[in-house]
Amino acid sequence: MAIVAIIGRPNVGKSTLFNKLSRSRRAIVDDIPGVTRDRLYAYIEWNNKRFILVDTAGLLLETEDPLESGAQEQVDFAIQEATAIIFLVDAKAGLHPEDKHIASLLRKSGKPVFLAVNKVDGARQELALPEFYELGLDKVYPLSAIHGAGIRELMEDLIVCLPDEPTPKDIEDETTVRIAIVGRPNVGKSTLVNKLVGFPRVMVSEIPGTTRDAVDIELTVNNRRYIIVDTPGVRRKGRVKEKLEKISVIKALESVQHADIAVLLINAEEGPTDQDLHIGGFIQKRYKGCIICINKWDLVQKDKSYVKFMLEDTKRRFQFLPFAPMVTMSAHTGKNVNKLLPLTMEIFKQYVTRVNTGLLNRTFRKILAKHPPPARGGRMLKFYYITQPEIRPPTFVLFCNRPEDIHFSYERYLVNRFREAFHLERTPIRLIFRGRSENEEN
């Protein structure tokens, strides 16, 4: 599929244009330059032509900041893979010397370049348009990304240069596995993503907070499509002070909300922390599949006594996620990384399991006969039948006469029996108890 990259200096409105065209709020937008660091992708359809739109970091031709240098490498990747480029400049700031250098760089790429002058919101900005012809590009497209004015003309000209592509299947169909890589800052999430995809797709730095956006990466292995989401590190609420960091944490948790499986990364040198448990609790409450990955294993594996203690401590503290397998790995060296996708596939197959209604009710009656629900306050609890309305996760609705009397221990008993009966050991299971009288059943 054709790829269109938005390129320009920092703070010219690239993320605002990306959000407007993708009809989303995926890219973080702020007046502070340098908010975007990694490449963000979105599927766009315009006049029946589909393509991939890429938001990029602000292009700086000279920088000594290691984070900015990494961001510039991501921009270089975007230019190399692009079919066409939207070169965005700022009407309010006027023509900047770096705009001329960027224009020269883009011309050398040999890609079609469309010069869009953003922030044209009135007569004063329109007067600045002629100076942008100095950049030597054929046409200038005035627009306002925030209001949407002028975008139509730009896009109608741009799609003419894009090759026709066969209409693909839905971007995410029922077989697509969405995996969110989550954890505290600096536990190796971006390193793991890059190791999985096989090249430096996202920025990696020892500086906590390098990743700000939740970045989706599509990967196909053995004809199975995966969407892997690299997320910002999640800090404790008390330590989340800056506005951008608060937004990043929200995006990380939203990524878990929309995922099928969350890979929770833990630093082997530190072992599980209270914040890791909080993230695990969020995963549990959203009924997501989970893998607990203890990363940086190469740094601790020689200390046998520490390893034994840490593994036992991790297993004990994550008892509330009994379905989550535990993997020791090193994203840096690649040790055991190859186990991750097969394990997610095993979990996913259980996560989308649907049980035949007849088998479900026969099994349920056997479970009830073996251990009937206890009476509470002298009142008998009766179950009538069970259905499965949903998957992702397997969700069972149990009809009974007194749903408010069901004790959590009996609910846990039922979940464990369903795991055994239907081979659902590695997926969360949701039970919904619904009231119904015996007369209604008859």
Image (tube, rainbow, N blue to C red):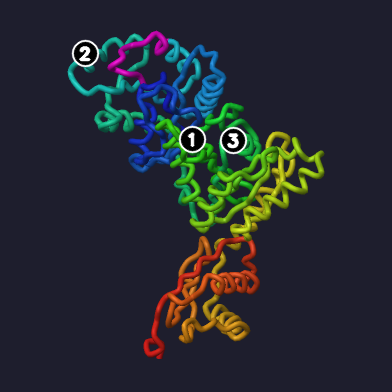
Question: Which residue is under mark 3?
Answer: 190
Disc 2 to disc 1: CB gap under 8 Å: no
Q: Position of residue 249 (x, y in %)?
A: 47, 39
SS for callout 3: helix
Q: Residues within 10 Å of mark 3 (few under 14, many from 20)?
A: many
User: Going from the N terminus, do you reach mark 2 or mark 1 first?
Assistant: 2
SS for callout 2: helix
* Dot 2 amino acid type: Leu
Give the Cα separation between the discs numbered 3 and 2.
44 Å
SS for callout 1: helix
The residue closer to the viewer here, 406 or 13, is 406
Q: In the image, 154: left or right of 389?
A: left
Q: Report how many numbered discs are placed on residues in the image.
A: 3
Q: Which mark is residue 239?
A: 1
Q: Residues within 10 Å of mark 1 (few under 14, many from 20)?
A: few
State which quarter of the image contains the C terminus: bottom left
Q: Which mark is residue 127?
A: 2
Q: Position of residue 414 (x, y in %)?
A: 57, 74
Q: Was residue 311 drawn as part of the magenta stretch in this picture?
A: no
Rendered residue at 61%/27% (across/down): 206
Q: Position of residue 6 (x, y in %)?
A: 42, 27
Q: In the image, 74: left or right of 114?
A: right
* Dot 1 amino acid type: Arg
Residue 362 in view, yes or no: no
The residue closer to the viewer here, 107 or 147, is 147
Rendered residue at 44%/23% (across/down): 34
* Dot 3 amino acid type: Ser
The residue closer to the viewer here, 3 or 19, is 19
- The stretch of residues the image draws in magenta is 88-100
| Quadrant position of residue 331 | top right
> In this rendering, is residue 135 above or below 32?
above
Viewer-nearest of labels 3 and 1? 1
